[in-house]
Image (cartoon, rainbow, N blue to C red):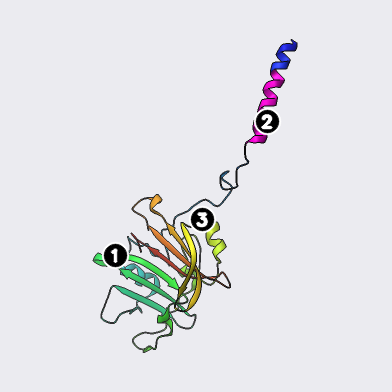
Amino acid sequence: MKRDWTKFWLCVSAAVTLLWIAPAKTASEAGDGPKRQNETTLAGLRPGRDKLRTATNVHGPYYQQVVPGANDVVAWVDISKHRVLRVELGKEGVIQSVTVSSIDPIIDQPRDPKTNPDVPLPSVLLATGRGMRIGHNVCSEVENTYGKPNSSGPSTQHGNDLLLLYYSFDWAGPKVPQVMEVSCERNTGLVVQITLAFPSL
């Protein structure tokens, strides 16, 4: 009987020793960290699937050509709220990328109100499918929602010092938008621009 108990306690001691030696898992390894999520819509539009007609149904017909005479990139500009929605079109008019921004220089360009009127763009209509919005969320909230970006780093755009988060969604399959870029102000952390693209930027 004593030998059996001796064997039992030797096994218990070995198990306890292994537990002490084994390193503790980090929160992300244990599955407690933010899980990666992909995104399929921005401003109510699905890059790779929707066409310009869908965009006009959602945001109205008063868009403008970013380059006069060219129909491949169009924009809805809300001067009063200082925000813009850009849509890049590909073959057969399918939307290739959608960008919402408060730093796009087209906002401050002179315009004829008759041909390029001010377009109301409520922030809730410019959100991603998971609720991220320019001027409302900060970079840390983006990471909490989508997980750790594939890359991040300082960036400068139109004279603004930014932090750029880059997400690749190729792991979610080829039929969904493949890339999302989120730009945040360096000093405040506020999201100022989001781009969702299919198949790539």
Is label 1 in contact with label 3 (beta carbons under 8 Å)? no
Dot 1 or dot 3: first in sequence order is 1
Q: Residue at x 68, y 30 (%)?
A: 17
- x, y percentage for residue 152? 49, 62
Residue at image mark 3: 148
Q: Residue at x 25, y 81 (%)?
A: 69
Residue at image mark 2: 17
Magenta stretch contains residue 127: no
Q: Residue at x 56, y 69 (%)?
A: 189
- x, y percentage for residue 60? 37, 75
- x, y percentage for residue 48? 32, 60
Q: Is residue 30 left or right of residue 86?
A: right
Label 1 residue SS: loop
Is label 1 in contact with label 2 (beta carbons under 8 Å)? no
Q: Quadrant where the C terminus lies? A: bottom left
Please say if 196 is above or below 36.
Answer: below
Q: Which residues are magenta?
A: 8-22
Judge the density around disc 1: few (<14), some (14-19), many (≥20) Cα neighbours within 10 Å: many
Label 2 residue SS: helix
Q: Nearer the viewer, mark 2 or mark 3?
A: 2
Q: Is residue 44 visible from the viewing direction of this image?
A: no
Quick one: 32 or 89, which is closer to the camera? Answer: 32
Judge the density around disc 3: few (<14), some (14-19), many (≥20) Cα neighbours within 10 Å: some
Please say if 13 is above or below 105.
Answer: above
* Image quadrant in which you'd find residue 116: bottom left
Q: Main secondary structure of the magenta part?
A: helix
The image's mark for residue 94 is 1
Magenta stretch contains residue 19: yes
Q: Quadrant where the N terminus lies? A: top right
- Marks 1 and 3, how far apart in space? 30 Å
Number of marks drawn: 3
Q: Is residue 165 visible from the viewing direction of this image?
A: yes
